[in-house]
Image (cartoon, rainbow, N blue to C red):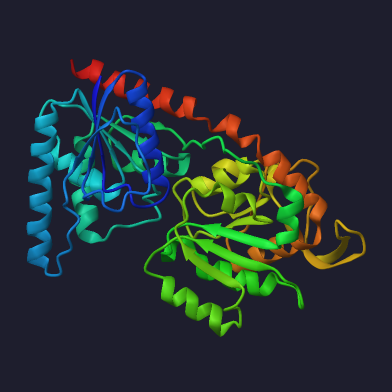
Amino acid sequence: MKIACIIHSLDGGGAERVMASLASRLSQRSHEVTLVTLGDGAGDRHEVDTSVQRRRLNLLFQQKSWLGKVSGNRRRIVELRNALSGISPDVVLSFCDRTNILAGFSCPKGVPLVLSERSDPSQQTLGRVWEWLRDRSYCRADHLIALSETSAQHLQRRFSVPLTVIPSAVDMPPVRSDRTTAQANQLVIGIGRLEPEKGFDRLIHAFAQADYESSNWRLRILGEGSCREALQELAQQLGLQDRVELPGWVRPVWNELAAATMFVLPSRYEGFPSALLEAMVVGVPSIAVDCESGPRAILAEPHCQAEVASQSHGGTTPHGGSAPVAATEFTQDHVPGGLLVPNDTASMADAMRGFMADWQTRERTGRQGIEVAERFSWQKLVDRYEAVLAQVVKNTS
């Protein structure tokens, strides 16, 4: 097939990583793939295979006035339509909400369109105008793809368009976590855009509540975004300015993850968290709050959940001796790579404290998380996307 893939940019996190890899893998299967980005590509953080053609449109300019925004989006639609007409694809695949909306209005007549929703639209509203536009754009699609059942149910109620659920995939890591070194590091890590929905303010509060007196635990948050200054101020207010690190985006992320004692996902809502999958496949014990959508799909089995109890228990350190008291009771015998805890700061803090105290449960969790690669493999993802694209092409031929 001749496939045009569209995304806003390759600058950011999970969605951009998946698009770059999916386009590359489709091209490696002998499809003719062109990747169109609304941005100019100057800030690309993800590479694509050399067989993938690139179209960089330089359309991510910002307009302040209402009239300027309308004019800017009309220009994006016109230039995107011109680019797609020049490519003359058999099928168009678009990623991410606002880009999907523009794709719906830009796709040339007669060319099938597949829109992949990379977040949970039931939790993330785009505002009245953009939601009005989404209602009129998504109905033009030939197929919708959701990351989870939660997102799919919302989309099915809203649009009478065929829909498939395809979760994200995780790369096989070039390294595994050396747990002797990682335990000694006493390092908690979080990864994601520094935006309100990612909940890193909650992670800093939870870290402050979970941390033992006179301990040497550190918190390292990889990512960039509009909340950087607020997060730095929060760490200072809590007296953690020397123990909370915000180094920005770090690529590749594998060595950073491998050095972590534990990983925590504090999101208020998610699409399908690639960072959680990456931490688990490296062998890092992981904690995720039970926000809507992705984490639940990865860790929702009953035996994954930590029972947050009022009673406390002690433990021993890996070097012998007493460990500080923890407030989380780990009741499961089998922990497949992570703990799913209630979606609040106190529960997150309790789980972190439990991991700090109970190193045996923590390390068993990390070892079992490696198995996640089998459930969320790239071959499964590409097979399913390829099948959807082939079906819509067949339906319109």
| Residue 394 x, y percent position in the rendering | 25, 15
Q: Is residue 24 left or right of residue 75?
A: right
What residue sits 39% from the left and 51% below the top? 122
Q: Is residue 261 left or right of residue 91?
A: right
Q: Number of callouts in the render?
A: 0
The answer to whether residue 260 is visible is yes
| Residue 20 x, y percent position in the rendering | 36, 38
Q: Nearer the viewer, residue 298 or 211?
A: 211
Q: Nearer the viewer, residue 222 or 209?
A: 222
What residue sits 50% from the left and 51% below the top? 292
The answer to whether residue 108 is visible is no
On-image quarter of the C terminus: top left
Q: Nearer the viewer, residue 18 or 133?
A: 18
What residue sits 75% from the left and 62% below the top? 356
Answer with the quarter of the image where residue 265 lies.
Answer: bottom right
Q: Is residue 84 above or below residue 302?
A: above
Which residue is farthest right? 321
| Residue 300 x, y percent position in the rendering | 61, 44
Q: Is residue 274 above or below residue 387?
A: below
Q: Is residue 204 left or right of residue 350?
A: left
On-image quarter of the N terminus: top left
| Residue 204 x, y percent position in the rendering | 57, 71
What residue sits 57% from the left and 53% below the top? 256
